[in-house]
């Protein structure tokens, strides 16, 4: 079973080839960071145009690196949503055209399901059911994964996603884009207890998240220091801010395990690349006797390998031979995040 996957939900144009759900033959990612960096965030219109310019090259590279031609494919997987609709439509239209031209099945994949399953691209594979903390630029949620196609939503952000908070704080500190990697590097030199930034617990047993108050607290601190004519202690701000995010994420993940009597925790999504979050989740999880499976850092941020893998599991789990649905539509909000 040879699958080509295409991912274009945000600011990465990506394509990958996966054989038999096991062998990743290629994993090509074209990042648009330089396009959006001057604006401190993703500009949707520029993102869609950039996807159009690069998609055919990225797909060709994925096939070349895998050493295969279109004739050897058994199906085409594509991110259907959630994401920026203009961006998603570029990948979806391209995938439809390829599938139609080659009479191949088209498998629509949910981007969040891709993140939740990306841990299986590494060597540390969890057993079902497991609790998954998916933290990225667009979403922050806790799920119980029952099997590769069944995820129970346990909690989600009520406002900003964790990665979005990193990006916005970096922007207000004038540090550049994307904020996550920059802040986590600067935080290494800072004191994580220097500033008492707030943690939004939202009640004792609550598994939802909120990060907009934290972002405002950082903005207020910056404003006060400037008014007082004091130089900003950037490393301390970064370390204290990061600690506030990490503490909430780790504590809620532990709470989810406790509430569901879960044994295994999985960390996924762009923010899962954060070294402090990885270390704290591993330390606190293992101290409490849980198994902690971290998605390899290279598969945390957006990629098409996770989309290929999710498609493979989707086909295997349902046993259905997917057809070519040319009416398949992109969606901006994930059905996985709908509260039952
Ligand atoms: O999963 P992803 O590539 O895209 C979305 O689906 O949103 O996640 C991107 C997000 C960005 O907000 C970025 O700042 C954040 O992941 N990120 C990090 C780190 N690396 C990427 N956040 C914190 N620490 C990092 N090391
Ligand atoms: Zn993502």
Image (cartoon, rainbow, N blue to C red):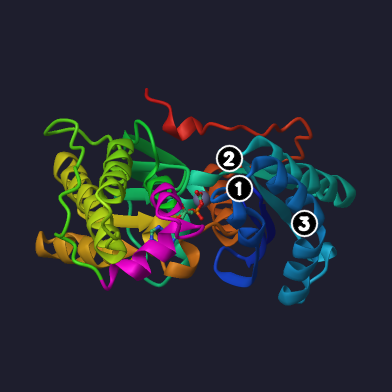
C-alpha distance separating marks 3 and 1: 13 Å
| Mark 1, residue position | 10
Residue 174: image x %, image y %? 45, 56
Q: Is residue 203 left or right of residue 78?
A: left
Residue 12: image x %, image y %? 63, 56
Helix, strand or loop for disc 2: loop
Q: At 14% from the left edge and 45% from the top edge, which residue is drawn? A: 258
Residue 227 numbered tag? none
Determine if the C-beta at disc 2 is less than 8 A from ligand 1: yes
Residue 83 numbered tag? 2
Q: How many marks?
A: 3
C-alpha distance separating marks 1 and 2: 6 Å
Helix, strand or loop for disc 1: loop
Which region is colored magenta?
168-189
Q: At 44% from the left edge and 57% from the top edge, which residue is drawn? A: 179
Q: Is residue 290 left or right of residue 179?
A: left
Q: Residue furthest right?
A: 101
Taking the magenta stretch, the answer to whether it contains residue 192 is no
Residue 78: image x %, image y %? 67, 48
Picture layout, residue 155 above or below residue 169: above
Helix, strand or loop for disc 3: helix
Q: Are marks 1 and 2 in contact (CB under 8 Å)?
A: yes
Q: At 83% from the left edge and 51% from the top edge, which residue is drawn? A: 98
Question: Going from the N terminus, do you reach mark 3 or mark 1 first?
Answer: 1
Question: Going from the N terminus, do you reach mark 1 or mark 2 first?
Answer: 1
Determine if the C-beta at disc 1 is less than 8 A from ligand 1: yes
Picture layout, residue 49 above or below residue 270: above
Q: Residue 322: in sight, yes or no? A: no
C-alpha distance separating marks 3 and 2: 17 Å
Taking the magenta stretch, the answer to whether it contains residue 173 is yes
| Mark 3, residue position | 55
Depth check: give the residue in front, 17 or 320.
17
């Amino acid at each position: 079973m040879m699958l080509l996957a295409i991912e274009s939900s945000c600011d990465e144009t990506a394509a990958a080839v996966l054989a038999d759900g096991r062998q990743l033959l290629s994993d090509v990612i074209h990042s648009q960071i330089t396009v959006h960096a001057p604006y401190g965030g993703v500009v949707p219109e520029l993102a869609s145009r950039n996807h159009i310019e690069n998609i055919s090259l990225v797909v060709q590279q994925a096939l070349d690196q895998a050493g295969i031609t279109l004739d050897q494919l058994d199906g085409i997987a594509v991110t259907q949503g959630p994401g920026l609709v203009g961006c998603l439509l570029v990948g979806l239209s391209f995938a439809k055209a390829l599938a139609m031209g080659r009479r191949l099945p088209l498998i629509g994949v949910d981007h969040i399901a891709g993140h939740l399953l990306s841990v299986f691209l590494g060597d540390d594979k969890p057993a079902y059911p497991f609790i998954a903390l998916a933290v990225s630029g667009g979403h922050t949620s806790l799920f119980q994964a029952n099997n590769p196609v069944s995820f129970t939503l346990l909690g989600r952000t009520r406002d900003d996603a964790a990665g979005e908070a990193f990006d916005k704080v970096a922007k207000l500190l004038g540090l550049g884009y994307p904020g996550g990697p920059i802040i986590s590097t600067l935080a290494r030199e800072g004191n994580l207890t220097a500033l008492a930034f707030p943690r939004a617990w939202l009640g004792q047993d609550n598994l939802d998240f909120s990060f907009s108050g934290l972002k405002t607290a950082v903005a207020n601190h910056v404003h006060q220091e400037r008014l007082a004519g004091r130089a900003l202690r950037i490393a301390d701000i970064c370390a204290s801010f990061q600690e506030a995010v990490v503490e909430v994420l780790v504590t809620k993940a532990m709470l989810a395990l406790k509430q569901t009597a879960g044994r295994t925790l999985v960390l996924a999504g762009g923010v899962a690349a954060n070294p402090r979050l990885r270390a704290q989740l591993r330390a606190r999880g293992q101290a409490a006797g849980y198994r902690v499976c971290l998605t390899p850092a290279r598969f945390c941020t957006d990629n098409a390998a996770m989309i290929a893998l999710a498609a493979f599991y989707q086909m295997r789990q349902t046993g259905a031979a997917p057809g070519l649905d040319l009416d398949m539509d992109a969606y901006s909000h994930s059905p996985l995040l709908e509260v039952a």
